[in-house]
Amino acid sequence: MSSASASEETGSSERSVRSRRSADSSRDDGARHRQSSDDALFPEAGRPARDKKQRKQDLLAGLNPQQRQAVLHTGAPVLVVAGAGSGKTRVLTRRIAYLVGERKVHPGSILAITFTNKAAAEMRDRVQELIGNRAKLMWVSTFHSACVRILRSEIGRFNMARTFSIYDDADAKRLMQLVCRDLSLDPKRFPPRAVLNWVSNCKNELVDTDSASSKVSTPLEEGYLAAYKEYQQRLIAANALDFDDLIMTTVHLMQAFPEVREQYRRRFRHVLVDEYQDTNIAQYELIRQLCGHVEDSPAQVEDGPAAAPAELMVVGDSDQSIYAFRGATIRNILDFESDFPGAETILLEQNYRSTQNVLDAANAVISRNQGRTEKRLWSDAGAGDKLVGYVADSEHDEAQFVAGEIDALVDQGKIKYGDVAVFYRTNAQSRAFEEVFVRVGLPYKVVGGVRFYERREIRDAIAYLRAIANRSDDVSVRRILNVPKRGIGDRAEAAVEAYAAEHRISFGDALRHVDEIAGLATRSAKQIASFTAFMDKCERLVADNAPADEVLTTVLQDSGYLAELHASTDPQDETRLENLVELVAVAREFVAAGGTTPLGSGGEGGGLSSLSTEPILATELPPTVETVQAPQDTEPQHRGPRVDPAPADSLFAEGLFALEENSGPSTSSGPVGVGSESVDAGSGSGSILDEVQVGPEADQLTGAEFELGAGAAQPDVSLGAFLERVALVADADQIPDSDGESGGMVTLMTLHTAKGLEFDTVFLGGLEDGIFPHQRALGERAELEEERRLAYVGLTRARKRLYLSRAIVRSAWGAPQHNPPSRFLAEIPVDLIDWRRTEGAVTSWRSSSATSYERERAKDEATARWRNTVGFGSSLPKKKEIPSLQAGDRVLHSVFGMGSVIATSGAGENAKADVDFGSSGVKRLSLRHAPLEKL
DNA sequence: TGGAGATGGATTTTT
DNA sequence: TCCATCTCCA
């Protein structure tokens, strides 16, 4: 906790700083400066406060004038325009600490919004280092988590049950597939995926179905709109919201109910938004509802005058806007000053992260984008090393080079594995790196890719839980209806569906009327009856307040899901079992920690935990609070006065905002009271409430409501709470902690994932036109510019060493592809790059021997395409003769180069050979297909 | 109903 | 190439 961090942006930065201390003596001046100042700052966290002046000085230590200006700013909305590595997040965290520590703002009235859960967790940690446990009362979360919390307490206004399902992308897609099928939309013209994207855009731009109707002009749009309407209706019927709904609905809620908006405007007196360049229109509107001068602002709200707008600070860098494809619009940054009258802009131009060479390269690239405001990022870290360039023969050669370079640097003691990251444009590119890294024994970790919660078995299990918690959730019910196989097939499903439509009930309810459904085979009916009996049993379990893990184990065992996997011979199913065991462990952990443990190892939970007690609190609390960790004891007494069949609502109904209906069980007794007392242990000034400033709205904000905030610490281990967490937390395994003595692991990730992180040494691979920039972006200028911003993000992740590489030949979709160098390479001034290997060296190496056998492999269309790009004619022999090989023969492979045959197997068409290609490793090749020549 | 074979599509990604 | 989804038939 006392560990300083060069930049507060990421966890990786913290790790890297640590390693920098031990491993690297050539620390740049900027870093040293930063560090000493932060070292002076953080030790205070655990001790009683020193005198106030000192404290304020510490808070501002190490900040440049612009950063100070931002931290100290009062009043008007502020846009902090910050370049990469200029300490934006640092400004935000210091500002929060300043607000709480100096301006006596109650942490409960602070809302900080970040882009990811991870960023939220880190911001909480950093703020906590600065102001101690008071930080727990802030709302630090993503837009989505914040909206869920608001909706939970207000959704009754929409006549929706409090227990709603949150549909992620895959659920939404499934629903849209059903919709498109039922509307008989031609899948060629209306691919569900495309329709869904269209709908998503509408929601992100707050175009609802009604206003969309007036815009529709083409038959194509008519189809889309029809699908949108139907899709939305089914969501509502299923008591479900998709991710876009979470925000859109919250905005609609505030627009429709001024008193609700007022309630939150009074609560949140300080709103801070990170990564503002990645917000979309709906998110912008939400901020405006909370902080803007809303025209129809209700002076007529009964209980007093409308709240003045909160103090708003947004932070962003338009050059790092890389999510336009998801609806983010930099308009929000560009128009900030007109959107929020009186707004001020603060520029942060000093970069504290990278050397000048790295910055020069990044600046040169990004300056090619049109219509951007020039920023002059500068660094006093010195020129540093030149960038290193490398042209590889193939993607394996590229990976080989990267691995070799990392090893060399580590051997020289210059870096640790954890200081290194390898970036690529698409996930598929990770394979080559992984193959090579595994072979040479380089410790690495891939971030992203297939996620835990996207695996089939996990989704099945979650679908079971959701169907139990919300039987209207058609998508989930139908997903598990015949999983494991029960003999309820499409036919039966269709019959139930027809019945449900006819009687206007949900699919789940229709299942309970098996006897009345026409056209059901007796066998199917029987199976359905036993299925519903099983589901009813589970529902009863939930109604009896069974904790989430118990429900989960019951489901997995009694549904026969586990049995099916056990019986399977498919080796994949073994992994599935392990994953389910993991899920159960996650649920156990969740329950054991009173519903506050982050899911999995990495990310901290979003919505639920941002205000609730975090694990650290549980461990720091005095023994009297043990009830917090013994949810079974406290759970019943927290049940509200309402008898509600929905299990999910205990937290929200009794917690944060249920002002009117919940004067019920006292929140000031039990764990809550103890919690709020112990929260402030660090500052030694008694209850935190003593420090609350009595401001203009203080009467709205003191006492009870804050305690309600603290009341979130009440354990909620119910199924609903668990499901919510699962829906909102993206992933369990994330950026590795490289704390270990071993030096950690090399991090592999896509450029998008890299946003917000930084590493001493960065390898950026696949710099080829068609790869990066991506094929699809080559045509459109706007898309190309987004790719360029992505390049800018990638380049600016590097602190000291930056490697750029490309491959001459890269196999894509099975066929080798020859890509020209990325245009971004040409945009970097030549004198900044030290080329270790150029194309000249490569072509001369290949040309002598490669042509003769490469033409041999004219086999299929893919190869023909490839041939054309390399410039061969098309009249080449169709059949390739299969070379006869034996152990010891020397061969030449078009991709792997020279090799020697170790062993052969098979014969004729099926002949295979194991060939040792030295640095490229041993490959088993089919002689019929491999571009192989006997020497 | 469910398995086997055909077909077609294949960024980036958080929540 | 590799995967997920679709179609057809037993």
Image (cartoon, coloured by chain):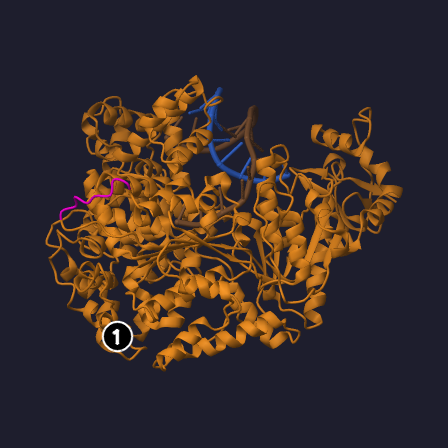
Chain colours: A orange, B brown, C blue
Figure check: A22 above or below A153: below
Assign the N terminus of chain A to one quadrant of the image. bottom left
Residue A318: % across, % down? 52, 48
A123 and A522: which is toward the camera:
A123
Chain letter for the residue marked with disc 1 in the picture: A
Magenta residue check for A297: yes
| Left or right: where A220 falls relative to A494 | right
Magenta stretch, main secondary structure class? loop
Q: Residues within 10 Å of mark 1 (few under 14, many from 20)?
A: many
Residue A139 shows up from this direction? yes
| Tag 1: amino acid | Ser
What's the residue at 38%, 78% (across, down)? Answer: A53
Assign the C terminus of chain A to one quadrant of the image. top right
What's the residue at 58%, 37% (across, down)? Answer: A783
Task: Give the magenta part as a residue range.
Answer: A295-302
Q: Hey, which quadrant is residue A502 in on the image?
A: top left
Which element carries disc 1, helix, strand or loop? helix
Figure check: A7 above or below A40: above
Residue A326: % across, % down? 47, 40
Residue A560 shows up from this direction? no
Q: Hey, which quadrant is residue A190 in on the image?
A: top left
Q: Hey, which quadrant is residue A877 in on the image?
A: top right
A572 and A849: which is toward the camera:
A849
Q: Which residue is mark 1?
A: A678
A469 and A43: which is toward the camera:
A43
Magenta residue check for A423: no
Residue A474: % across, % down? 30, 35
Residue A881: % across, % down? 81, 33
The single residue placed furthest to the top in the displayed view is A219
